[in-house]
């Protein structure tokens, strides 16, 4: 088959044959360069896809971590709010006891003063 490919060159001058040979060499060189660039492109695309996958996985992991952290913080806030309400309730109960005891103290002071007055008479 190569003889048929070369047949069209018969009868051409050596200068033209040299130019054809140079062009064919240049075509071969360009084909090889194109193959190398195509390989580089495919390699870079594969690396890009791999990097994209890493980014997606990283973002998924970060989102899951943030979701867990957010849930934990919400639970902590709920627990703190419950503790605050309990402390507030306990404080109100103690203030009520203090008020009752303060009233009793005032009543006892008045009784003491009255008794002291009676003793002085």
Image (spheres, rainbow, N blue to C red):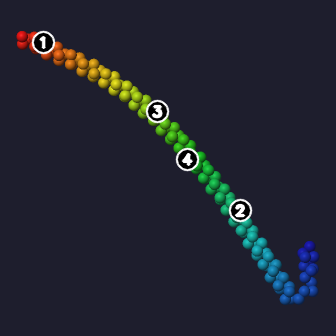
Q: Residue at x 71, y 68 (%)?
A: 37
Label 2 sits on residue? 42
Q: Position of residue 42 (x, y in %)?
A: 71, 62
Q: Looking at the image, is mark 4 or mark 3 nearer the viewer?
A: 3
Q: Is residue 72 left or right of residue 1?
A: left
Identity of the residue furthest to the left in this view: 121
Label 4 sits on residue? 62
Tell me how far mark 1 sits from mark 2, CA to CA: 107 Å
Q: Looking at the image, is mark 1 or mark 3 nearer the viewer?
A: 1
Between disc 4 and disc 2, whose residue precedes? Answer: 2
Between disc 2 and disc 3, whose residue precedes? Answer: 2
On residue 115, which mark appears? 1
Q: The N terminus lies in which quarter of the figure?
A: bottom right
Q: Residue at x 92, y 80 (%)?
A: 8
Q: Position of residue 11 (x, y in %)?
A: 93, 86
Of residues 74 and 34, the one nearer the viewer is 74
């Amino acid at each position: 088959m190569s003889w048929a490919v070369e047949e069209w060159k018969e009868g051409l001058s050596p200068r033209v044959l040299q130019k054809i040979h140079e062009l064919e060499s240049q075509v071969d060189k360009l084909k090889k360069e194109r193959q190398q660039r195509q390989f580089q492109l495919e390699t870079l695309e594969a690396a890009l896809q791999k990097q994209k996958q890493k980014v997606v996985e990283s973002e998924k992991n970060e989102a899951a971590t943030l979701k867990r952290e957010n849930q934990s913080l919400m639970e902590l806030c709920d627990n703190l709010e419950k503790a605050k309400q309990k402390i507030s309730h306990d404080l109100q109960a103690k203030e009520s006891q203090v008020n009752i005891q303060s009233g009793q103290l005032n009543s006892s002071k008045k009784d003491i003063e009255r008794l002291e007055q009676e003793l002085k008479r």
